[in-house]
Amino acid sequence: MIAKYGKKFDNKAIKRTPKWLQDSMKNSKKIAKSFANKERKNLTKCPMCESNKARFYVNIYDFKYVECQNCQNIYLQNPILNTSELYTNDGKDSHYSGVYLSDSIFFNRVKNIIFPKIKFIDSVVKAESALLQSKAEKFLESKMWLDIGSGGGDCLYCAKSLGYKISGFESDLQALNFSNAKLDSKNIESNPVKQGFLDIFNCDKDLLDSIQKADVVSFFNVLEHLDYPRQTIEFFAKNMKKDSFLVLEVPKHKSLASFANLNAPNRVYRHFIAPFHLNIFSLKSLEIAYSNNADFMDDNAAVATGGGGNAYSNS
Ligand SMILES: [Zn+2]
């Protein structure tokens, strides 16, 4: 296991001012309340390990989070019935506008947040590949980095700067256009980001093709939004090629962020983002999901980076 904890960054440089935090809290509360009267599910099992033993953890704006007593995963016990309603978008608004799709912030985010993260993943990938191939110097000759849910393109921008060929899928049109403008400079692939999102039950052919070819698949801050997180990890295990790397970034429990949200449930704007974040993953829950795919783990490595917590490779 390779572990690295924390990184320095300057909140002001990325416009995370106290006012931005206050506005985000108000906005998160308003949005959560707007979904509070929707029809709900009532989960009786942990989505990650299927244990039915759970204990109340915290209520966030009328949404109840419980902690699995087997794997310590935290899950939203009463999510809205049709979670796709959370993401209906007429294309005029962008989830990423404001702090993401801005030229001035893009490079600050790259420097302060994204590059250290991608560099760490690259170091894990190279260390593991050296073990696998014993010819690390030839490593980057044709390595393809696929980012699913690529947002404003900052991860791909950094991966490209480290020598990877890049490919992305993003459903938000404004983010897609912004990232292609940033990435589509001379001598590289034209428009490396395509429109699309992962549906494991009916996967887009282009996306499936990319997953099967990629050497590194990054899937950042998406798994916590999905109804079937364990099955999604299984989907990657079935479809990714031998010796490739799956990189997940998820909100992590236990962590300082969980503790902060627990103690100030009325001021939540990240981590327990109700009703969008369906799971706040424990390391054990991810390890259970990986170990269910033991064949995959024999041939591949997973890197997980956790918000409010840590980053690790479990191989
Ligand atoms: Zn569990």
Image (cartoon, grey):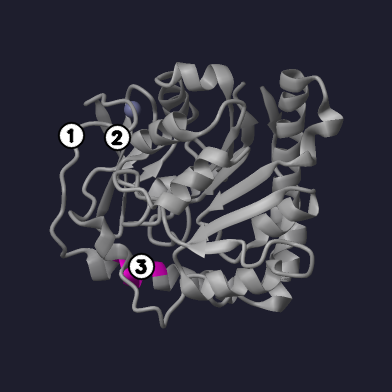
Residue drawn at 42 percent across, 30 percent down: 238
Let me know if residue 109 appears in the view: yes
Give the crowd class for mark 3: few <14, some 14-19, many >=20 residues within 10 Å. Answer: many
Q: Percent x, y for residue 150?
A: 55, 58
The residues colored magenta run 28-32
Q: Which residue is mark 3?
A: 29
Which of the marked residues, 2 or 3, is nearer the chain's N terminus? 3
Within 8 Å: ligand 1 and the Cβ of disc 2?
yes
Q: Percent x, y for residue 25?
A: 45, 68
- Mark 3 element type: helix
Q: Amino acid at mark 1?
A: Thr
- Real-space Cα distance between discs 3 and 1? 26 Å
Indicate yes or no whether the magenta region holds residue 72. no
For marks 2 and 1, give the one nearer the viewer: 2
Q: Which residue is mark 1?
A: 44
Q: Amino acid at mark 3?
A: Lys
Contact, CB < 8 Å: mark 3 with mark 1? no
- Where is ligand 1, by quadrant? top left
Within 8 Å: ligand 1 and the Cβ of disc 3?
no
- Mark 2 element type: loop
Give the crowd class for mark 1: few <14, some 14-19, many >=20 residues within 10 Å. Answer: few
Q: Which residue is mark 2?
A: 47
Residue 74 sits above or below residue 287 on the image: below
